[in-house]
Image (cartoon, rainbow, N blue to C red):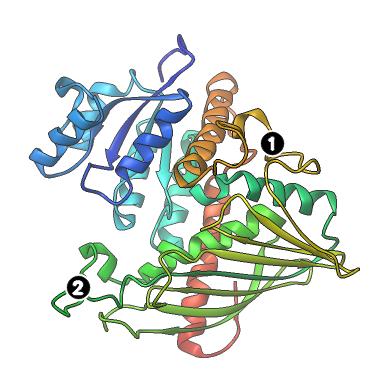
Amino acid sequence: MKEDKTNKLRVAFVGGGMNSAVGLAHYSAISLDNVFELVAGCFSRRREINYASAERYKVPKNRTYDSIDELVTSEKNKVDAVVVLTPTNQHASQVISLVNKDVPVICEKTLGCSTDEVEQIRAALQKKNGFLAAIYNYLGYPIIRELRHMVQKGTLGKINHIQIEMPQEGFILINREGKPIIPQDWRLKDGVIPTISLDLGVHLHMFIKYLTDESPINVVARSESIGSFSEIVDNVNCIIEYSNNLTCNMWYSKIAIGNRNGLKIRIYGSKASAEWLQEVPEILHLADVRGNRWKVDRGNQEVEISNQQRYTRFKVGHPAGFIEAYANYYQDIANALQDYKRSNIVSFKDCFGIEEAYEGVRLLEAIQKSSKSRAWERV
């Protein structure tokens, strides 16, 4: 790992080409606060896309590679981390290879497609004392961080129940000719854990983990295939028992017509409740046991986290959105990576690593098992 002679952390991308679902979002996010600099990459297996992406991201041709092995051989001592943005089914092998070569890794969710894969990553990290941060970008919204602070200081009282959902419509939509709109090929293949759980369910669990720090214990679930692609699961409902007597109703779907990305959380405590909708990300709706109802944003006098300077790229009333949430989360990863470079100790404050990812994948496997057994399953 290179010496830290500059304030910027230099990274390389694996995947994330300009034709991918997430590449430009990640590039924009790391560029926003001048914390990271993208200096190299292997952006696509398709040569023309690879080099077109490098040009778009202002990466020199001589630091654009046709394979991960070439990238690591040339860049290992020139970059601070490699960001893995490939499809989920490629994550485990790529992350393990990078960790075994002593390269710090930042990886899009989900880290693996099964507990076996995540256990292998975990073993490699323990052997090498490596660095791995997993990306859950929705946790970067300032108001979500305000909500977490409220939970931690007891504003809502004891958290008893959470309703959380992530409905989308992509697997039931049709084009102008009346034919199904076809997603990326890898999204149409289910493994041990259905792809919809790896894609959406993992976000919902991580929200609960981030807000409450509770762990899943038991789950009962129902999975269905309703939309245009009968070979994959596209709708999941479940009830989850978490530690500390917390119950959660969770729904995620890709056949919910009318929902672009209806991520929503309602959290109920003994003193008050809170509700947040991702499509209106600056507003938190609150209610208390006296029947009062009100809303807060970054401009309210009572907020303590979301009005901090790091979240105020522009004044209140000009919403902080999806890319800003990515950038906030990346800044937390940068803090953890800088600490790791100084101390060789992995420690996260507002972002997550292997242990939380492992817990999440265990939950997703239990959801699938329950869907088949039609019974409660232990996480």
Residue placed most toward the observer, 254 or 335: 254
Pointer 1 residue: 307
The amino acid type of the residue labelled 1 equals Asn
Q: Quadrant of residue 140?
A: top right
| 172 relative to 175 in the view: left or right | right
| In the rendered image, the vertical position of residue 94 relative to residue 5, given as above or below | below
Quadrant (top left, top right, bottom left, bottom right) of the C terminus: bottom right
Q: CA distance from mark 1 to mark 2?
A: 43 Å
Q: Dot 1: few (<14), some (14–19), or many (≥20) neighbours within 10 Å?
A: many
From this view, report whether residue 339 is shown above or below residue 370: above
Residues 159 and 307: in front is 307
* Residue found at x 82% / y 59%: 156
- Camera-side residue of 206 and 129: 206
In the rendered image, residue 128, in percent from the top left (x then y), is placed at: 46, 34
Q: Amino acid at mark 2?
A: Asn
Pick out the residue farthest to the left.
48
Where does the image place residue 157, in percent across and percent down from the top left? 86, 61
In front of the other: 76 or 125: 76
- The residue singled out by tag 2 in the image is 175
| Residue at x 34%, y 56% (from the top left corner) | 88
Q: Secondary structure at mark 2?
A: loop
